[in-house]
Image (spheres, coloured by chain):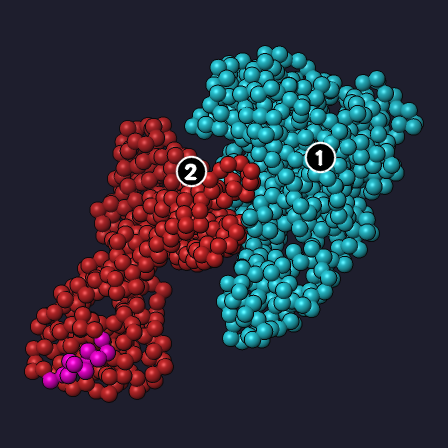
Amino acid sequence: MYDTIVAIGTPLGESAIGIIRLSGEKAVALADKVFQPKSGRPFKDHPPRTMVYGHVVEGEEVIDEVLTLYMKGPATYTREDIVEINCHGGIVPINRILTLLLREGARMAEPGEFTKRAFLSGRLDLAQAEAVMDLISAKTPAGFKVAYDQLEGQLSKKVVGLRDRITQIMASIEVGIDYPEEDIVEMTYQEIKSVLEDIQAELDGMLKSAETGKVLREGLHTVIVGKPNVGKSSLMNALLRESRAIVTDIPGTTRDIIEEHLNIRGIPLKIVDTAGIRETEDIIEKIGVERTKAYFNRADLIILVLSGAEDLTLDEERMLELVRERNALVLINKTDLPQIIDEKRILEFVAEDRLIRISITREHGLDALEEKIVAMVYGADFKGQGENPLISNVRHIGAVHRALAHTREALSSTGQGMPYDFIEVDIKNIYEALGEISGDTIEDDVIAKIFSNFCLGK
Amino acid sequence: MIMTNNVYDVAVIGAGHAGVEAGLAAARLGAKTILFSINLDSVAMMPCNPSIGGTGKGHLVREIDALGGEMGLNTDRAMIQCKMLNLGKGPAVHSLRAQADKQLYHTEMKRVIEHTENLHLRQAEVTEILVEDGRVKGVKIATGNSFEAGAVILASGTYLGGKVFIGDAVFSSGPNGLAPADKLTQSLLDHGVSIRRFKTGTPARVNKRSLDFDKMIIQLGDDKIEPFSFLTPAINIEQEPCWLSYTNPRTHEIINDSIHLSAMFSGNIEGVGPRYCPSIEDKITRFSDKDRHQLFIEPEGRYTDEMYVQGMSTSLPEDVQVDFMRSIPGLERVEMMRPAYAIEYDCIDPTQLKLSLEFKDIAGLFSAGQSNGSSGYEEAAAQGLVAGVNAVQYLRQQEPLILDRSEAYIGVLIDDLVTKGTNEPYRMMTSRAEYRLVLRQDNADMRLTRKGYALGLAGQERMDLLLKKEQAIEEELRRIEAVRFKPQEINSFLEAGNSAIVNNSVTLKDLLKRPELNYDILSKIDVTRPALDQNVIKQCEVTVKYTGYITKQLAQINKFKGLENRRIPEEVDYQRIEGLRIEARQKLDSIKPLSIGQASRISGVSPADISVLMVYLEQRKRRVENV
């Protein structure tokens, strides 16, 4: 048995309820030491899966009025005994109860340790365990949904379906090989090809949605560029006002690299290095074309802000050239002033639908910008389509990429009329690559993966 | 009591296909070996089909041969027809199959045994295996005599507790009317061996003169016979044909009307039969939508009129057998010589064995062939050879011969039996081999002869032939890269052969890569080609044509080896690993896998269990390193 761990199950901050969770052999014994049920009977004598009302006490002092729930292993998340103490929200009661339990012998859980135990006990497969980690760290409701669906096994279901169809091809090929003299009808090249094409289309779809999925989970890496006084800061502030969830100064980041996290209609925007941008006068002059390019390359979305009341500068034209092939939106700001900018010139670089006319001071056109961002993330122009992104995890995306490459090879082998047993080499590779997602293929490096995600061992 | 002249290094129980390879291998490695058979007239007997090889099985025979076994050579001596199957498919699944003269096969093999130094063939029923302190000491026979042996190999086939079923007739018997071995099972049980009951069957034999071949389709052998053994230069024989006919709705009606009389349906048989080799009543019941099933009539030998009715194995009563056969075109007047029967026998659970085929709990006791739950002559012979070698390695305290799944079909066979176990008689199939693109029957010598030679089993002649072949391949591969054609020299040839013309000069190798071209077609323009052995041509063609796929397969093998090389320390206590499911703990504990790779193939051990095990081993390693 592992030792008994404890952690706070709700976010720290002002809230109505806080949950403290214990998992392990001594979960009940520990709870028993600090919790006095109103019934007068010790907590351990109450049946599992009932809420028990009472108080957490330290010596004579009542710390908080709580509801406590005992879930008996192995029918729990970690397959161990779990106790949840529901106390009042707020840092003080939560911290005091936690401290009390630590003093009684519980150990503070490491990040992700509950999930680690669920995985190690076989309660979750790797894909599910990863989904839980994603779920916890998802930044918006849409990102949460991707992770949740994955946990629910949507992805696994899809993968199992694909693997089933591959198995059918393999079975047909095998029977033909092992029973050459039986009168059995084998799949024709045409039939194999058609199944492979279906699989290819499905994998393609998964990958396209993957881009969206990744954005939803990790945030849309966005940079805002433009010459001084064109309205970048005002744009930032306007977007921040619109955004419901504002997170600044994320732990682990330092002051000189600022990440602003905005939530635009469910899409997390991660505006990086805005401090630098805001100060930058003439970006290309200052850091050079190559570095600007590299800077742009790191971005999922570039917002180039121009002033409608001025002519295009040479630097702005060079920037237009750089964003031509990228996910970029061009904002023509200051529509409230007389317009002298040459829009035709701009349209030589970007399509009309990437152009947004806006007046930030009048807060006019911000809706259009937000809609555009949403359309880009979910829409066809953002290297993907929006419907139900199934995968967002980097390891899964890699596996789907490999499966797709093997599918193409299998199709090419089929097209060349290679003997069936050769085609099967490619087909088996598809099968294995998909198995990596559901955890049915045992990978040698899975161990490295597990250790890096769940910080096991010492 | 043991008489002083009854002292041997190795004793082999049974002289079927497993026993003879085991006995020959042990004796050839220099061990003083005694080979027991209930009846010396049944040495290397083929009690079922009169053929050797076939898909997957042909590969096994080639591998046995490459290692220095006898089955390939003996088949070459006894064959009366030969055919390479699957020629329409890739070279990896081409499979050789020969029809053998059963009598000749037996006589030739018996003669080889009689002429082998250190090998003593002895008629006796072994009734007891002698074990002291967990080590095997010898065997005792029905007459009460005992023989001392440091290693004993169980190769008891279908003789242990053999019971034959024909309709409602049930009697104690070994195969083909031979005496069963009814005492040995108890001895195995006494030593803690777990025993299971399997079932198999064989169809009727009929008189050739009662058949009308005009109503059947003739099945001929190949024009040019490819021998099984790498040592056999060529085979020139007159071949005997086989014949094909089909059942029809009338046949099925007769069978259905009497199906309640079949021993297999009446519930008399407790043993588990093989799914891939169903009886005719099974086929009709399970595939009721099929209105016909094929059957092959195959000769039992050159000097007999007995014919084997392949595909019609059954445990129906004799009169029903005759009735349904007579409804088949060409068999209207059939005269049955031996009835079909089902046979039930005791075998061991092979998961009690190590990959060396030695019992985990009884040092020096090995088991091979049908007694391990396999079926088929070739599967038996392959295990026999490995058990024979490893009995000697055990006595000499040398590393056992263990082939892995990427090295040989033999490796797949033994790993499947020992690691996964089997719930029905196990048959080799190419689909069981994950890496069959490199496990071809044409390169078995290149894969295995060096190992056989290092053991002392494959002789100098084999080694010399291998080196010669490898050198010729190397030279030829160099040559085809050097021979170039200019467009004007080659384009008319390409055009005539519907192959794309070229603008720049090309090498012979470039041309060979094209699917529509091969050595044969290219011989017209390849005028400087030296005389080449067919085997060399085949290797070069495969190497050039399929190099991309072989590279992919080698990558798969590399991945496989990664897990195979993650060894699990012997002292790991699975019962104490947190997170392993109970079933996985029990399975791992009983199989005691050598590596993560082997562990992952145990049924009942899930990928999640493997992850847990890997995590445990990693933590254990870190702990050890930190100490």
Q: Residues within 10 Å of mark 1 (few under 14, many from 20)?
A: many
- Relative to B99, residue B63 above or below: below
Q: Which mark is residue A80?
A: 2
Magenta highlight on residue B600: no
> Under tag 1, what secondary structure?
strand
B118 vs B306, nearest the viewer:
B306
Residue drawn at x 72%, y 30% is B301
Compared across the picture, whether B488 is left or right of B40 comes to left
Q: Quadrant of residue B524?
A: bottom right
Q: Is residue A380 left or right of residue A444?
A: left
Q: Position of residue A199 (x, y in %)?
A: 38, 51
Number of residues whose C-alpha sits closer than 10 Å to that of mark 2, classed few (under 14), some (14–19) or many (20 or more):
many
In this view, the residue farthest toward the front is B214
A344 in magenta: yes
The subunit letter for the residue under badge 1 reads B
- Tell me, yes or no, if residue B622 can be seen here: no
Label 2, secondary structure: give it: loop
The stretch in magenta equals: A340-350
Amino acid under label 2? Glu
Residue B279 placed where, x, y %?
55, 25
- Is residue A371 something one can see in this rendering? yes
Inspect the image, locate mark 1, and give the three-letter code of the amino acid beneath it: Ala
Mark sitting on residue B100:
1
Q: Position of residue B210 (x, y in %)?
A: 64, 22
Q: The chain shown in red is which?
A: A
Q: Nearer the viewer, residue B280 or B323?
A: B323
* Vertical comparison of A194 with B171: above or below: below
Residue closer to the observer: A219 or A310: A310
Q: Nearer the viewer, mark 1 or mark 2?
A: 1
x and y percentages locating residue B438 in the rendered image: 61, 52
Colour used to depict chain B in the structure image: cyan
